[in-house]
Image (cartoon, rainbow, N blue to C red):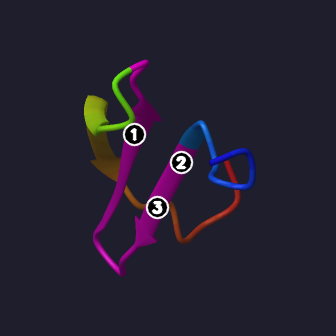
Amino acid sequence: MPNEPKTILATDCGSTTTKAILIERQDSGEYRLVVRGEAPTTVEAP
């Protein structure tokens, strides 16, 4: 379908850890997890 997104970036900014995942639609129409990552959340100015 032309209105379906090709790429989805989802984030979860928690109080101690920030997590992110990248999902992409394949030519077959299925969505696949491409990469995920996490890092400590910064609460103070860098």
Residue type pointed to by label 3: Thr
Residue 3: horizontal and vertical position, in percent? 74, 55
Residue type pointed to by label 2: Ile
Q: Determine the secondary structure under disc 3.
A: strand
Q: Is residue 10 magenta?
A: yes
Residue extent of the magenta highlight: 8-27
Label 3–label 1 contact, CB within 8 A: no
Q: Which residue is mark 3?
A: 11
Q: Residue at x 62, y 48 (%)?
A: 1
Q: Which residue is mark 2?
A: 8
Q: Is residue 31 magenta?
A: no
Residue 5: horizontal and vertical position, in percent? 64, 48
Asked whether 16 or 45 is in front, the reply is 16
Q: Which residue is mark 1?
A: 23
| Badge 2 density bin: few <14, some 14–19, many ≥20, Cα 10 Å | few
User: How far apart are the two marked residues, 3 and 2, measured between alpha carbons?
Assistant: 10 Å
Picture quadrant of residue 25: top left
Residue type pointed to by label 1: Ile
Residue 7: horizontal and vertical position, in percent? 57, 38
